[in-house]
Structures are given as C-alpha cells and as structure tokens.
Image (cartoon, coloured by chain):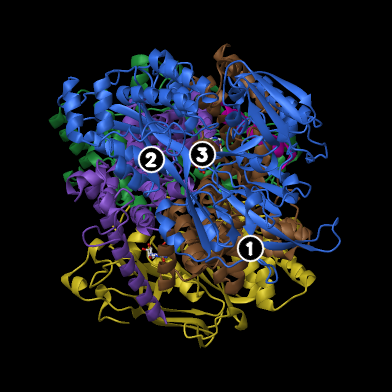
Amino acid sequence: MNTALLRIEDLKKYFPIRVGLFGKVVGYIKAVDGVSFNVDAGEVVSLVGESGSGKTTIARCLLLLEKPTSGKILYDSEDITQLRGEKLRNYRRSVQAVFQNPFLSLDPRMNVFQIISEPVKNSMKLSREELLEYVSSLLELVGLDKSFLDKYPHELSGGQAQRVAIARAISLKPKLIILDEPTSALDVSVQAQILNLLADLKKELSLSYLLITHDLSIVKYISDRIIIIYLGKIMETGSSEEIFENPLHPYTRILFSSIPDPYRKFGERVILRGEPPSPVNPPPGCRFHTRCPYAIDICRKQEPPEIKSSLIHKVYCWLHTEKHSSETKT
Amino acid sequence: MPFSREYIVKRLILLVFVVLGVLFITFIITRLIPARPELLWAGPHATIEQIEKARKQLHLDKPVYVQFFLYLQDFIMGNWGISWRTKSPVFTDVLSTLTATLELVIVAFFIAFIVGVLTGVIAALKKYSWIDDFIRIVTVIGASIPVFWLALIVQLVFGNWLGILPSAKRVDEWIVIVTGFKPITGFYLIDSIIQGNLAVFVDALKRIILPALVLSTYPFCLSARMTRAVMIEVFSEQHVKSLIAWGLPERTILFKYSLKNTIVPVIASLGLSFGYTIVGAFMVELVFVWPGIGFYAAMSLLSFDYPAVIGCVITVAIFYCIINTVVDLIHSIIDPRVRL
Amino acid sequence: MEKFKQQKIILSLIIRKPISFLSLIIVLGFIVVGLTAPILVPYPEDAWGLTYNVEKRFQPPSIEHPFGTDALGRDVFSRILLGSSFSLMIAVGVIGLALFIGIPIGVIAGYYGGRVGTLLMRITDMFLAFPPLLLAIVLAATLGRGLLNLIIALAISWWPWYARLVYVQTNTVKNMPYVDAAKIAGLPNIKIISKHVIPNALTPTIVQAALDMGSAILEAAGLSFIGVGVKPPTPEWGLLVSEGWQSINYAWWIAFFPGLAILITVVGFNLLADAFRESADPRLRRTILMRLGVKQ
Amino acid sequence: YVSLPTPPTVTPTTITTPTPSQTPSVTKKLVIYASLSEMTTADPSTEFSNSILWLCLVYEPLLWYDPLENKFIPALAERWESSKDGTVWTFYLRKGVVFHDGTPFTAEAVKKSIERTIELGQGAAFIWDPVEKIEIVDDYTVTFILKYPAALDSIAASSYGAWIFSPRTPNTPEWFNQGNDAGSGPYKLVKWDPENEVILEKFEDWWGWKLPSYEMASPKAPDIFIVKIVKDAVTQERLVVAGEIDIAEYIPLEDVDRLKADPNLKVVIKPSFQNLLMLINTKKPPLDNVLVRRAIAHAIPYEDIVKIARSGLAKVASGPVPTGMPGHFEDFRYRYDLEEARRLLAEAGYPTGLDKTLVLVYTAGDVYEQRTSELIAASLSKIGIKVDIRPMSWEEQWALAQSGWENPEMAQDLFIFYWWPTYITPFDFLYNMFHSGSKAFNLCYYENPEFERLIEEAVSLEGVDKSKALELYYKAQKILYEDVPAVPLWDMIEVRVGRAYLGNLEKAVNPAYPTVIFAQVLSVEK
Amino acid sequence: MTDQPILQVENLTIDYVVLDGIIKAVRNVSFTINEGEVVCLVGESGSGKTTVGLAISRALPENAIIREGRIIFKGRDLLNLEIRDKSTIEDKVMMIFQDPAATLNPLFKVGEIFSDVIKHHLKLSDQLKIREKALEFLKAVELPDPERIFNSYPHELSGGMLQRVIIAITLSVNPKLLIADEPTTMLDVTLQAQILDLLINLKKKFGLSILFITHNLSIAAEIGDRIIVMYGGEIVEEASSEELLKNPLHPYTKGLLECIPKTHIKYSKLKSIPGMIFDLRNPPLGCVFVDRCTEATDLCRKDKPRLIEFLKNHKVACHLYRGSTK
Ligand SMILES: Nc1ncnc2c1ncn2[C@@H]1O[C@H](COP(=O)(O)OP(=O)(O)OP(=O)(O)O)[C@@H](O)[C@H]1O
Ligand SMILES: Nc1ncnc2c1ncn2[C@@H]1O[C@H](COP(=O)(O)OP(=O)(O)OP(=O)(O)O)[C@@H](O)[C@H]1O
Ligand SMILES: [Mg+2]
Ligand SMILES: [Mg+2]
C-alpha cells in the first residue's frame, strides 16, 4: 500500500530477564511477538488489548524509545532504526506522542511556556517573540488561553494538563501522534473534552493517530481501523465498522461484551474465565486458547493462519478456517 | 528457608569483594598517601636497617600492582602484621579485643531495639498527642547528642556526683581474683553465668549499663523514630485499613499485623547505623576504659600504629558487611516477596 | 470524643509549628553567628588562642565569663562562639565537596547506565561497604590533623551516599514520561540532563544535603575528639570538649558548654529535617528513608 | 562515690583466695596500680620503655641508686669496688638468692645476663659500652674490665638494661613475651596482658623478706600487685577516689589540692628526673641564627608555663640537666624579657618579627605538652613570631624529625621533647640531645666540637674524678646556654595519689626509676 | 428485595483535618439502602464516595471527624455504638476495596488473614473448622484450587484472584451489607466483567445488600437498582437506575450521561462538562455544581438547593426543580 505513513513488519520486542550479580539472562518477556500493521495518512488506528498485551511497547518502539529485537518499522520506505542525521530529525518531528498520565509527562519544574516551546526551540530557529506567539497559538488550538503560559503543571487540572501535553505534541507539526491511553487517567467529564479536542485537531491539522487503549467505547467513537492484540500478537484487525458489527475472533467478542453498557442489563454477556498467561512462556498454538471458550484441539498446537474476511478485515483464528468453521457453530 | 544456597554463595562472594575493596582503600591510604610508608611501618626508634627491612617487607621496591597483590596475600594468610605498640600479632590482638566490644554493642543494640520499637509504637499510637511530641523531641535530641560528650557527662554525673554505678572498666579485678573467674568466651556476662559466678555477673552487668546506655542512644533514637514513621505509614496503608474495616480487634491489627510490617525497615536502619555505633564505641570505650576493639583502635590510631589500625578497620568492615547480610536475611524471612 | 480528638490534633499541629520555627531560628542563628563570630567575640585573643591568663584559670561561669574560663585562663564563651565559624566552615565544606563528587557520578551512572554506570556504582558500593565514620577517621589520621584535611576526609566518606541518592533519583527521573517526551522531541542527552534530569533529580538531594550539615558537624566533632581532627588552638567544638575532658572533675564547664553547643546546633538541623520530612512531598520522604536504609 | 562492688565481708585491700595449694583460705593483701600507658615488652634485656614499671619488681640489678640521698643501695651485689683509674670494677654478690625458677643466683647469671643484653644491642644496651669483658672470679665475685673509665656503679643501677636473670630459662624474646619471667625479685609475673593488666604475685622465697633490716622490703608488702592500664588521668582520679584502684599514676594536676584534702587519700609529691625541652632546628633559617634563638629563649614565659601546664608542679628548668641530679646548676635560666627578645630579634635583622611561620610539633594527647605549646605560641606571637602548633603521634613526629638530618628544611622548627635518664649521669642528657653522634635524639641537629669534647672528657672522668667531671659538665652547659640549641622548659615534679592505708608510699617512689612503685616497701595497713 | 431499609444514613457530615486546613469531604449526605438492594454511589474523583463507605464500616482514618449525622444499621446507630468490638454485632457490614493487591497484608498468607477474620467474627477456635469454612467460601467465589490459594501469599496471586479472595473473606462472616468501593477499577475489562458477574450472583445467593461505589455510570446503570449521584461531597440526585438513565434531572447527571461516548455515532461532538471541581476546603455557599453549570442563576450561587423528591422515587438537589414537585 503506497499511502502507508508507517509500516510495521513482524515487529518483535523481547525484554531479557536478568538475575544475579552478573545479570545472567534466564529468559525473555515476549512483550511484542511478531506484529505487522500499517498506519495510513489521515487515519486513526486503534490498538486494543488487555493490560500487558504489548501495546505500549509497540508505541515505544515506534518512538525510538526502545530498540526492537527484530522486525522493521518503515517510514518513507526506510527503516527508522537505521535513520541518521536530517532524516532522523525529520522522523522525530513527524511522530509525536501523548501519554496516559498528563502530570507525569510534564516536567514539574517547567512552566507551560517552557514545556511547549522546548521541542520547538530545539528544531526551529525562532525569536523570543515569534516563539511566544507560536506557543500562544498552540494553546489556543487546544482550548487554553494565554494566562496559562506561566503556570506550572501542579496548578493545572488533569484535563488542562493533558491539553498542554497535546499542544506540545502538535508543536512540531507532526503527521502521526501516538496516543497511549490519553484519557484513562481522567474523569469521564474531562475525557469527553479531550476526545473532542483530539477529533477536532485531527481534522484541522490532518493528523493520523495511533490510539492505544483498552476502553472500547472510545475506540468506537474515534477510530477508522482497529487492531485487537493479545499477549503480543494480533488477533484481529479491520475497519471500525466491520469489527464492531461483525467481530470474528472470540477474544474480540468477549472484549465487546465486557464493556459496561448503561443500556444493557446484566446477564447477557459472555464472561471470560481465567487470567492472561505470562508473556514469558506464552501458550503454544493460538495464544488465546487457554481462555477461549471455543478452543479446539488444533488451537493448542498450531498457530492460527491469517483469515481475510474482507480486504482489510483479518482474523487469526482456527475457527474461521474453512475446515473448522463448521465446528464454530456448535 | 526463604533464601537459597546461591544467595549465601553470592553474599559470600560479595563479602570477598567488600573485603577486597576495603583492602584496596586501606592500601591506598597506607601505602600511597604517606610520603614514606616504611618510616611509619618500622615504627619509632627504628634503625636504618630496620627501616630498610620494613621497605622490603612492604615490597616498596616493587611496582604498585605487585605491592597490592602481595599485600592481599599477606592479609589472606592471616599475616596482619605486628602491632608496634603491643609487639604482638595484630590478628590475635584484634581477636582478643573483639569480644569485649561485641558484648557492649550487642547489649546496646538490644536495648536500642527493644526500647526503641516500644517507644516508636507508643508514639505512633499516640500520634499528635503530647506523648508523641515529647518522644519526638527526646529522640531528636538523642540522635543529635555527641556520643563522646554524653559519655563524659554520664560518667561525671552517675560515676562522680551521684556515685550510683561504676563508670569504668569491664569487671572488678578483686572480684575476679576472689572468685577465681576465668574468661572462656570473652563475653563476661555469659562466662559468669556458665561458671555460676553471681558476683562477677552482677559486677559486669553493673559496669556495662552506663557505656551500653550511652552507646545505645543513637540506635535507640533511630529505631524509635523509624518505628514511628514506618508505623504511621503502615497504618495508612490499605491492608491495615481493610483489617480495621473488617472489624479485627486493635490488638491483633497492631501487634500481629502492623508490627511485622514495621520491623523490617527498623532493623535495616539499625543495621546501617552499626557503622556509626561501632565508631561511637571507639569513643565510649575510650571514656569508660572498656578494653574493646574501639579502645584498641583509638589507641592505635593515636600512636599511628598502622598494622593495628588496618586490622581493626578490616574487622569492623567485615562485621558491617555481615550485619547487613543478616539484615537482608531477616528481611527475606519476614517478607515473602523477597526471595534471596 | 470526636471533638476532643480534633482539638488534640490541632493543638499538636500548633505545637509543632513553634518547634519547627525554633529549629529554623537555631539553624539561621547558627549560620549568622558562624558568619559574624570573628567580629562578635568578646575576647578575640582568647577565641583564637593567641593568649593565656594565669590568674584567670578555671573560673566558673560568671557574668564576665558566662561559660567560665579554661585551663589557660581563656574565655570559654569566646572560644565556643568562634567555634561556630569553624563548624560552619566544616559543614559547608564537607557537604559541598561531597556533593561535588557525588552528583556527577550519580548522574552519569544513573542516566547512561551500562558498563560505565555499573562500574561507577560498584565503586560507590565499595565505599559504602566501609562503615562511614571509620573511613573518615582512617583518612583523617593519614592526612594529618588540620581543618582542610578533616573536611577532605569527611567528604570522601560522605560522597557515596549522595552518589547513590542521585543515582536512584536519576534513574527514576530518567524513566519519567516527561523525559521520554523530551527524547521524542529529539533533544540531545546533554540538554535532557541539564534541563530535566538535574533539576528534578537534584532537589531532594540538595535538601537532604543541607539538612545533613548537622551530622557533618557532629562527625567532625567526633573526629576532633579522638584526636584526628583539627589542631589546637583551633576552637573547634569537638576539640574543646576533648580539652575540657582533662579537667572535667575540676571544671565541668569547659567540656560541658562546647558539647551543648554541638547538641543545640545539631538538634536545630535535625528538627528542621523532621519538619521537612513531615511536610515534604513523598518523593523527598522516600529519599530520606532510603538514606536510613529503608527499602521501598 | 562509686559504691564498692565487693562482698561485705571482704575489705577493699584484703581478699581471700581459695587457692587449692593452701588449704586454709588466707587473707591476701592486694594493691592495684593504674598506669597511663600500656606495657611494652617483657624482655629485660631490650625493654626501654614502660615495662620498667613491673620489671623493677620482678628483676633486680646489682645495685639500686637513690639520687635524692645520693647513695647506692645494695641489691644483688652486697659490696663493690673500683680500681683507681676507674677501669676495673669488682662486685661481691649476695649469697642465698634464688631465681623464681629455683636456680640459685651466682656470678654466672650476672655474666650471662649482661652479655645477652650487650649482644642483643637493643634498648639501653649502649650503657654497657665501656665494658670490655666480664670475668667470673668465683661464684660470688664478678669483675668488669672497662675499655675506658666509667662510673659502672651508676650503670649497674640503671633503670634499663641492667637486670640480672636466670641463666636456666630459654631467655628468648618470644619466651619472655609469652608472659614468662626469669627474675629474682620480690614479685613474680602471673598474668601478662600488656594492654590491660599485669598481675604480680609475691615471691615468698625472695631474700629480702628474710632480711628484716633491709630497707627495700616491708613486712606488710602487698601479696598481689596489679598494674592496671587506665589511659586517662580523669578516670584514674575517679578510680582512686572510689577506691577501685590503690595508686594512681596520673591525675589532672589541678585536682591535687582537692585530693590532698581527702582523708582517704595520700598524695606523694616528689621531684623526678624527667624534664621538658623545646628543641630548636639549628640548621634551618632563620633559626640557624643564634640571635633569633636567644630572642626566642627570652620570649618564653617559664613561670606561667609551670603554673598553667603543670599547675605549679614543676620547676623552671635551668639547663638541660634536671634539678636534683648531679651536674645540675642553677645558673642557666633564661630571663622572660620581651624587650630583650625584641632587641635580639632586631639585632638579628628582624625588627618587626619573623616573616616565616614556625612549625612546632608536640605529642598529641599529652595535655602538658599541649598547654605548654599553646603558651609558647601565644607568647612568641607577642614578639612577632607566628607559630603553627601541630599535634602528632610520637611516631610521626619522630619520623619527621629524623628527616631533619638529611634535609633540615623539611623538618619541624621547634620540637617539644621529654627526656629522662637511662642511668644517673648528666652525660645521658647532654649526649643524647646535643651530641652529633646521637642522630636519633639530637633533634636540634646541633654540632659543636668543643661541646662534644667537653662532655666526652667529663663522662670518662665520672668514675675517677667527680668534681672535675662536674666542672666540665658546667662548661658544656654554659656553651648550650649561649648557643641555645634547645630551650629547657621545666623539670617535672611527680605526683602519685594512693589510698591512705598505703604506708611508705613516699619511700616507694624513686626519681631514678620513673613511674616505678617499689611495691615491696609498701606497707598495707588494713 | 423489600422496602425495609437495612441502612439509613442521615445528615452525614465528615471533615478531614490536614496540615493546611480542613477538607469538608462529605456534607449532609442522607440516603437509605433497602434489604437486598444494590445501591450505586456514583461521582467523580474526590466527591466523597469512599469517605461515606468508610464511615459506614467505621473505618475512617484518624484525621477524619464525623461532624454530625447518624448511620442506622438494622435499627442501631453505628456512630453511637459504645462497643468498640464490631464482632459483637450479629449483622455485619463488610467492605471490599479498590486495589485488591493492597488490601491484604503482603507479609501474611491469605489463609492466615482469612482465619483471623473468621475466628474473630464467628467466635470459632477450632483451626480445622476455620479452615473448612474458609475453603468453602473460596470455592464459592469460583476460585480453582482453594487449598493452594489458602496457603499462598498475596503477591503470588493475580489481581482478579485476589479480589475474589477478598470477596470470599468478607462474605464468610455472613454480612448483611457489603460495601464495594470501586472493586473493579484496577482490573482489566475482562476481569472487571468477571468480578461484577460474581458479585451479582453472590448477592442473590447470600441475600446481600450492596452499596456499590463507582465513578463509572455505565457500570452503575448495569448493576444498580438505585443510583445516587454525588458531587463535591453532596448528593445531587438519586433515582432508580432506569429512571436516572431515562430522565436525568440534575445538570451534572445530564452532563455525565452525555459524556459517555455513544457507540452508534462516530466523530460527533461529545458533550462535556467544562471547568473543574472546587477546592473542598472552601465549598461554595450555594449549589455545589454552580461553577460548571450552564444553567446557573444568581440564586444557585447564594442558596443551597435541598435534595427533594421531585418525581416519585427520584430526588434531586437543584433550583431548576423547585416548586413544581409532582
Ligand atoms: N522495560 C521493560 N522491561 C521488562 N519488561 C517490560 C518492559 N516494558 C514492558 N515490559 C513487559 O512487557 C509486557 C507488555 O507491556 P506493555 O507495557 O507494552 O503492555 P500494555 O499493553 O501497554 O499494558 P497496559 O495496558 O497495562 O499499559 C508486559 O508483560 C510488561 O511487563
Ligand atoms: N485521609 C484523608 N486525609 C485527608 N483528606 C482525605 C483523606 N481521605 C480522603 N481525603 C479527601 O477527601 C475528599 C474525598 O475523598 P474520597 O476518597 O471520599 O473521594 P472518592 O469519591 O472516593 O474519590 P475517588 O474516586 O478518587 O476514590 C478528597 O478530596 C480527598 O482528597
Ligand atoms: Mg501501556
Ligand atoms: Mg474512592
């Protein structure tokens, strides 16, 4: 696909487990274990999965905060881990991020002006006045006024702080913003404000988002494409509509039915049993088989193949292979 | 056991490294800082030949790294040199003085720990009351008192003015001779009990009270303050709150549940304070004429008796390391999350 | 019952404030006196040990000599007063030097990690394995008596604490999302260290260090007392106690008052530290507990 | 005061020992003596330091010397005589003496002991330098042939290196330092813990006990004598006041008056032959200028130093030979006169004082030296001489001073220094501190051939012509007085504090044997 | 479900004393819980939900002061109860907490704590019986291998399992009322569903009443019979869950409902509530929501609206609904 802004191919990230005085490696946490997807320009892709499924790790790899164990991350058909000099700077500018806890992502010792202007100062030559003007305009864009310029993070509310973080993220005019659970630390009323803002900014600045979350209600609201991930592997991916209307993977279905819904009464949901297994020794075959109510023999032995339901709706599940689809219905 | 054999092995390796480190530092201090170490080593009244001999003995004619290696070798062979003052091997000197100090330090730590934890618990329970304020002020003062000065004052007041307790020596010679007391382990309190010698026991006990109390001031205040702080912290932790919400009696919550959580950091801080206490013992022993390693070290220090000083330093450092290992072991026994 | 409890709490908080205030007064007083003592002393010659007076030996406290006179007939009060200057010098010197060594090591080891970091921290651990005061004593004895040597000896036994504290702080700060944000923005390491890591990692250390000055005074006095500190006739408090020890049966005031001066000063610092701990943010509290050896 | 921890039936100084050998329990007299410094070695040949304290009780020399009455007291020798030229000395030995190991004492022991001391060549062995050879005439007569005339009676009464010990024991340094003794004296060594205590027990077979008229023995002498190391004066005072020890060696001097008033105590004040000097580095400018040295000598407040440093318990020195010793003269005191000092300094070319700060070293921990140093510094500052006083350990101080022979610039300027005699002769003071042959202790780095000739001649005359010898010593000291290589400060007056029930305490102290208490003459009255 | 109130909270007002002032955390809160009913307490962070819960369990921290109010449980005022020992009350109130990993003392085995609770409340002393009882309840919360869990330390169990253990502990003493303080907030969506499911099943099985505290209106609507909305330490609205969803009255409740992303509409503007909560040390004179309310009038600023039953079984505290009571 030529329009792909960012292309991730078979990304793996293993964290070594070290013990002892000399840090002997006794095993690996397979946080991300062979993930491929792409983010197109102007698109919102959501990465959904339970805690520990590797969502943040993928994001950190994309942000060059973590070095992938293997696999490629292609930007302009070049592997970003190999980028140097101007190209690297260009990539850095194009991909920005907003994190979960706004208070932790703002330096407590800097005021709002310093926070937002820091990346700008680093990559553009602006005079003090220009800088002030630019930062003010960014603030305006995220719905804050000039009076915030010299406030410190602890003087801000959660929502305001997150707006500042967003202003910082857009200050370099990026193409893609990675949003790692941008609202999960905020109260519902504030969450809505931030989501609105993000939606507005996307339109105004023609941004792409990679949204990381485990809250499906947000996903439905904002994203074009959804990737369901479990224990470092993709389970299902497809357009937002397709997945919501026709979830194929059992895990996806269970996730959906787990979302509390004020308009649904209790008792109609599928309850998932058990806990996610450890990423150190992920189960063989399909990773989900230990908790899957529909698991059949082959799930325990062999990794499921990719099944295309439509051009972009893919699922990794034995139950949807020709051979086994009949068994699903039982 | 909540700790593995590997852990013990690891700690032993660590101990070796620590001793190596200490030896390295002492090597630097004794061989590289003084302008002419052989002069110091040969001691006073040394003849030219003796100085030359010392030079040979210190391997000063060899390159520095060879010197260090040979220094290590000597140390491992138990060849800690001959004290200039006592003319006997430092190793035996250190061993013979160690028990006196250990007896003093153990008694002091025992007092400090028991009384300190109790005081801390009271302060934590009576948080913000006048009792708490009082304890706070007393323990802050206690932690700020120069131990040598306290020793002098205590000796002056109790020994001289009030005359309540004897304020010098470990045991009275007369009683020792009268009763035919013979030290076995070197811990007089234990030895006298083994021999059923009440008179020596009482005398030794009387004589250890003042120095031990003085020496325990700092660890006592430390453990009281730690206990209070940690206890209050523990009280605010969810697991205590949940027990309260579930209606368990206060006694159980306090003495069974909270105390256990409190004890680890308190012991850890005590272990850390061992370093200060042992140096405190230098001064306390000096003032109370207590024939321990602190007294020995202080005397050696004043006469620049290098072999003896190094021997003491290494011994204390090894003990410091051992004590911190023990603290870790206790931690692992108490806290199941810690696997060693 | 509930009402009573509240009154108790409020009362206690009110009591705490004056105590904290008092501690502040003591510390500020100490600093001011330490800076101005050379001008203030009533008998400067006595204070500097430039004189003696046969007639005035061992005079008990009086109006003329509030703390009495010593074996050489010098005014004890003057000597103690001037001693505060030396204590201040020692405190600032030791802490300053220790920070000067400890901070770069802690920051480099914490931020860059890796081999160099491990090596630096192992060296630090090696020093920490030494009982702190003991190292200072041996060093002071080797270097010889004198103010500067005393400061060097104490600082060398002191820096590993700060190195470790800074190391831990740096490690925490290094993993904070705001540092990640700076990295994402493409800031070079030097800038990240100077703008984010140092300001955030150092504040608790600096506060801790300032409050450690009491301990520095206490330990310096201890060294002088056992005879490896400053040399006479420097009116350092520990040395004054040691000199007074000789005549304690005859003239208790010579040893008593300098000890009291140490006590009051150190209490001032420790009470202030206490007040800080009570009101400080949990981050600072954690670091203080860490210095006490509490594993978090 | 400290309550006595003894059981009520036991009096402080008499205790009952259930010794298995003596079936009925006997009451023994016990005396504890507190010593400030720890013991050094137990080898009588090489010991040159604090162990003299108990060696004097365990071993005996041929003679004792009482300098205050200027007489010798026979010990192992009953009589002695010398040839006219003072080169042949004959000693007639006491009969019926046995060593602690049971060996009878004969001339062989004398020869072997002294020869061993000479052979080992350590400690005070130099005192036997004049001896050419020792000849055994018969079992109880021994003759010393000397290379040059010398006062061998004084040498034989030396406090160091003159002990006679049993020829039947191994007599190696190791054997001695394991706590064995080979003496013949009134006490034998029971416990040897040089850092804490030394315990001596009465040797019942000592010849002196059986000799009622012998002045060095008392019928009520202690049965057990303990030397307890108590390292500071304050504690010693406290212990003796509390009755936990019987004799204190060192107490804070300002307390002497108070202790004198205590009816339970007895304070003995006796001159000693220990003196304190300030050695001047005569090789280092500006102190190589004799005028500067003289100026310094006049700028030292001798009287005040005695009052402050020793609470008056000392005498202002007059020359390096202490008061009371032969060879001491009263003519060598410097006048404390700041005007004169300033004048001399100006004459030397320093009208406004020295531009260099002088380094004065003294032994750390010695309060008398410290106070003295501080006074000197304070006083010299008045004539424009700045002094930096440095407390050092003796070892450090001495090592620094040693470097002065090679490189006087590196060494200290002023050195506060004690001396006390090995045996009673002015030569010991004058040679050791001022003769260029004595590199170890001539720490003024003083070289004066005329002076050296004078004292060498004087010492050789000591055994022959005492008055001529003294005349020469006078001349030599006159030279020192003018050259000022050192400033003698004070001659010590010693203080011992004992419990009141100790009779003869005064008699038990002898300035020729510093720090020794002759326990055998004590009379325990309770 | 009967209309018999098992718990009546009247005029509960609670302050916290802190170094720099007094936090007025809960003010004039009154509500009831009927037997067998699930009442949800909903509100933003800091609105005083936990404080109310703790007050009912009589487990408020030391610096909390109950200014006034009564908490009547089964006819007895829990606040006036002279007896310090809660085990003497036959009908217990038990509480479960937000963070399962922090609820159990990490230094003790699960079984040890479990046994102590049973021993104390049920006055049992036979270790075997206690153990039996514990295992029975561990089974009841659908934990696999109760024996192993009984002998485990808390850190050896995952969050979901721990929350089940805690539920087992609290249920083992036969409580009549269970206070669940955000028991699922720290858990993953899938586990959250498990625990909610379990709670509802157990409620039926043991005939419990539950005060369920949450900030998630969706959850509240799903499991609650009745919902109480709190804001800034006061109750602003109270109604059955259907009624509240259908017909929210208070502007705050309305806002909250509109904030929840609607699953069916995409990229539409979400409604949100502007502004932030006031400083709890200085609660406003008038309505608590006045600063963020789009419909606020002068009256709202001056006069505090009382909680009135505007519709049947639907109470609201807002001046908009003055006068025209049903
Ligand atoms: N730096 C690291 N070192 C070791 N393990 C790590 C590291 N970072 C993440 N992990 C592990 O990798 C796995 C995936 O973590 P990740 O943070 O990517 O999950 P996540 O999907 O973002 O979860 P959450 O929803 O909790 O944020 C987890 O098991 C985690 O413990
Ligand atoms: N122990 C305490 N000391 C002081 N203030 C407290 C204490 N506990 C709670 N508070 C304060 O009281 C107010 C109400 O707290 P509470 O915990 O009841 O709110 P909540 O509704 O449960 O919030 P959350 O959703 O965050 O749990 C808050 O402002 C909180 O900061
Ligand atoms: Mg994450
Ligand atoms: Mg809460």
Evaluate if marks 1 and 3 touch, with contact meaning CB atoms under 8 Å apart.
no
Q: What chain is the brown one? A: B
Disc 1 from disc 2: Cα separation: 39 Å
Q: Percent from the top left, x then y, of residue A163?
A: 29, 44
Looking at the image, residue B163 sits to the left or right of residue C285; the answer is right
Within 10 Å of disc 2 (Cα), the crowding (few <14, some 14-19, many 20+) is many
Please tell me whether mark 1 or mark 2 is closer to you in this view: 1
The disc at residue E212 is: none
| Callout 1 secondary element | loop
Output the letter for the chain in yellow.
E
In the image, the segment drawn in magenta is: B4-24
Name the residue that disc number 3 marks: C134
Per the image, the residue denoted by label 2 is D370
Q: Is the residue marked 2 within 8 Å of ligand 2, measured from its CB?
A: no
Q: Residues within 10 Å of mark 3 (few under 14, many from 20)?
A: many
**Is B9 covered by the magenta stretch?**
yes
- Looking at the rendered structure, whether the residues under marks 1 and 2 are on a common chain is answered as yes
Chain of the residue on which disc 2 is drawn: D
Query: What's under tag 1, amino acid-wise?
Result: Glu
Chain A: what color? Answer: green
The chain that appears blue in the image is D
Do circles 1 and 3 both sit on a common chain?
no
Whether callout 3 and callout 2 share a subunit is answered no
- What amino acid type should be assigned to the residue bearing mark 2? Gln
- State the SS at label 3: helix
Examine the structure image and report whether residue D292 is included in the region drawn in magenta.
no
Query: What is the spatial separation of the Cα atoms under label 1 and label 3, in whole angstroms?
Result: 49 Å
Q: Quadrant of the N terminus of chain C?
A: bottom left
Colour in which chain C is drawn: purple
| Mark 3 to mark 2 CA distance (whole Å) | 26 Å
* Residue topped by disc 1: D525
Determine the secondary structure under disc 2: helix
